[in-house]
Amino acid sequence: MKTMDLSFSEEIKRYGSEDFYTCYSCGNCTAVCSLTEKNANFPRMMIRHGMLGLKDEILSSKELWLCYACGDCTETCPRQADPGHYMAALRRYAIAYYEPTGLTRLIFKSNPFAIVLTIILSFILGLFLFTLKPDHEVARWIFKWLPFDVVHDMGMVIFILTGISMVIGLFNMFRHLSGKNQPAKERRNSFFQIMRHLADEFGTFRRYQKCDREEESFWQTKPWYVRPWAIHWTIMWGFLGLLAATTLDFIFKDPAMKIWWPSRILGTVAGLLMMYGATLALWYRFKRITKSYSESHLADWMFLGFLWVAGLTGFWLEIAVAFDSDSVVNHVTFLIHTVISMELVLLFAFSKFAHAIYRPLALFFYFREKG
Ligand code: SF4
Ligand code: SF4
């Protein structure tokens, strides 16, 4: 039986979609969306679900994650219901719902809370970093107030809790996507076929590219490398490349001085890719270049801003190491870089960043049934 939650529409407004209630179900948005399909119908259907308070339908829907927020539907809506941002608000709602601690809910619904939490967390992480050098004068000052073990163990507990929240969040989503709301299918793709589809999707963003090729699209006449799919691609692969480079550095204990070392080259190329994408994405939002970039949630700014600062400080340090420069400015830059990078990891399960694990899982279920 379908459960209706009549307070649901009010709840969605608090995640950033104010106007979806003006929708009169004309279907223009679905007609114009290049990613909607016979068996994956959105965004009109999602708006109907929202208006009727069919919360479970939304939480167990793969369609929510098939949308790449191109905003074509918003451009054509005669009622200014803004279906593109409605889909983004639903994704925030879903991330907050799956995550078990309730912290994501507070972060997405209250901007002041998100800002204060980020500042406090930066401070704690900064202190935590000093505990790794217990003979440093700042560390000695900290230990006058807080014992070394307390600061160190507190940091470790926060990291472990983040990991657990992420695993439970994924499990919650899995439960919804594989639950009783799903239609029975006669034929399903094999694991190998699904993986092939996923590799193609994330390797080429073939589906996302469809949005930018639409005749009416603002991007249709623009070069491919400034289009939203390419920006998303560079951010994603740049970040993954940096993650791989950092892991290789850690495994091989690479002396950071050697810039020709393969992991350093990988890190530099990946960092450039990520900086390129993050800079353009921030610029588009700042200039409100299209409707899809016109209303950014704080979560969007924070996610991109963190990536950008982490990338910039990373390059600064790369140059400082290459020139063997040992100054206070470089030490402060190192502190900022490490705190921001750790904060990105720590807030992974509680921020927009979490879409990086939820979307692939939803696409796994989508490709399982796709012919
Ligand atoms: S969101 Fe706009 S375009 Fe879509 S069905 Fe509603 S009124 Fe029509
Ligand atoms: S934002 Fe783009 S991909 Fe998402 S529903 Fe609208 S038209 Fe489709």
Image (spheres, helix red, strand yellow):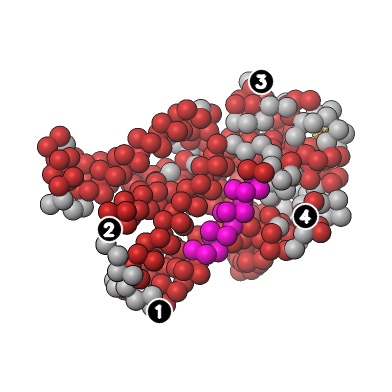
Return the residue at label 2. Answer: 327
Decide which of 221, 183 is in the foreground and name it. 221
Question: Circle 2 — which element?
Answer: loop
Q: Earlier in the sequence, mark 2 or mark 3?
A: 3
85 above or below 313?
above
Residue 62 image point, x, y percent:
66, 47
Q: Ligand 1 is in which quadrant of the figure? A: top right
**Residue 126: x, y in percent?**
29, 45
Q: Is residue 91 above or below residue 12?
A: below
The answer to whether the residues at label 2 and label 3 have Cβ atoms under 8 Å apart is no
Foreground: disc 4 or disc 3? 4
Q: Which region shows up in magenta?
A: 271-285
Is 305 inside the magenta-drawn segment?
no
Q: Is residue 269 above or below residue 236?
A: below
Q: Secondary structure at mark 1?
A: loop
Residue 260: mark: 1
Label 4 and label 3: CA atoms lie apart by: 39 Å
Q: Where is mark 4, residue-wise? A: 219
Looking at the rendering, in which quadrant would you find the N terminus?
top right
From the viewer's perspective, tell me whether residue 201 is left or right of residue 303: right
Q: Secondary structure at mark 4?
A: helix
Please report the residue visible at 51 percent of the width from the left and 27 percent of the height from the top. 110
Q: CA distance from mark 4 to mark 1?
A: 38 Å
- Spatial CA distance of label 4 from label 2 is 45 Å
